[in-house]
Image: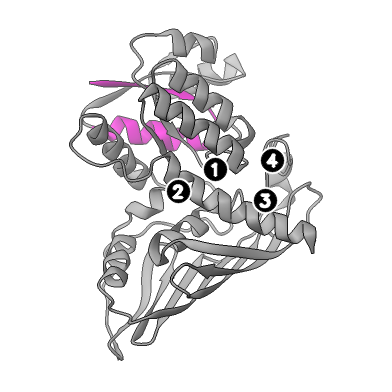
Amino acid sequence: MYKFGILGCGMIANIHADAVKELENATLCGAADHSPAAAERFAEKHGCHAYASYAEMLADGEIDAVCICTPSGFHAENAIAALEAGKHVVLEKPMALSTADADRIIETCDRTGKLLTVISQLRFAKDIQWVKRLIADGSFGRISLCGLHMKYYRAKEYYSSSPWKGTLKFDGGGALMNQGIHGIDLLEYLVGPIKAACGKIATLCHDIEVEDTAVATVEFESGALGLIEGSTCAYPGFERRIEIHGDEGYVILRETLIEKLMIGGREVSVESLGGKAGTASDPTALGCHNHRMQMENLLAAIEGREKLLVDCREGKKAIRVIESIYHSSAEA
């Protein structure tokens, strides 16, 4: 029975706790937070122990794995500390705020031999897996054009609810690094490696340090071209759409659901195989099913039964793309 601890007791930690409790071969032992009172409240809610500090959790030899749910700016140092303490890690997105810090995590994983999975739970949705197979099989012909549209809305109360939200130091970025990283991860996961990315970011509607509006173009290693749109001020908020076009068909995904599909020049009527509620205007509208599937993969990988599907090198990919967009915007 694998024993989990959770660091950071905010909203997303509840998703991790629910996912761990659904695992047949794991149990939630405890939680820690910079606020001992928050850890106590969380522990009471989920029926586990409240550690006085992160150091105390890491010193507990009973803990096998740690879910890191702290603000993004702490992810790298928290992950490295857990790996150094001999724990496996489930790390919330983004894994770090720069590719340099992502590389530090990768080096620590390699040196300690411990496994780390970066939360990219949308990859595990059934429709996403189906589209992945269709693209691999060449069902759409040669992919030429892709679009990722993330027109979200966050009210000013979202940013004022936590002092770290919307800051460069702790959020690292906005519409792309925070809200948009899952979409960018999915786009590259489905279509293939992104060779180059450039774009423009701006802060137009919110009093924050990071971008609330972004546009970018990308070039895939396959030669296909793509467009990325990201926003947190597109009222009232729209569900993420991914459009992938080839010379023999196309697919349109709404969140993780296939909305339209054409194969070999014929439209296909598709009964959805999965999906989840959208978070276009409500970041709390998120279930734990795909988190659980990703954690199951981690435990299977620890036992050598499966390959770890979203390791630290996979987690770095979206950061590299976003970092390229930020750099190109600053140089424009």
Dot label at residue 174: 3
Q: Is residue 100 left or right of residue 221?
A: right
Q: Between disc 4 and disc 2, whose residue precedes? A: 4
Q: Position of residue 127 (x, y in %)?
A: 31, 64
* The C terminus: image quadrant: bottom right
Residue type at tag 1: Pro
In front: mark 3 or mark 4? 3
Residue 119 visible in the current orientation: no
Cα distance in 3D space between marks 1 and 3: 11 Å
Residue type at tag 3: Gly
Label 3 crowd (10 A; few <14 / some 14-19 / many >=20): many
Residue at image coords 26%, 66%: 133
Image-quadrant location for residue 153: bottom right
Image marks 4 and 2: residues in contact by CB distance under 8 Å? no
Q: Nearer the viewer, residue 104 or 93?
A: 104
Is residue 12 one of those drawn in magenta?
A: yes
Cα distance in 3D space between marks 4 and 2: 19 Å
Cα distance in 3D space between marks 3 and 4: 9 Å
Bounds of the magenta segment: 1-23
Residue type at tag 4: Lys
The residue carrying mark 1 is 94
Q: Between disc 2 and disc 1, whose residue precedes? A: 1
Cα distance in 3D space between marks 2 and 3: 19 Å
From this viewpoint, which residue is outermost toward the left?
305
Q: Is residue 55 left or right of residue 232?
A: left
The residue carrying mark 4 is 165
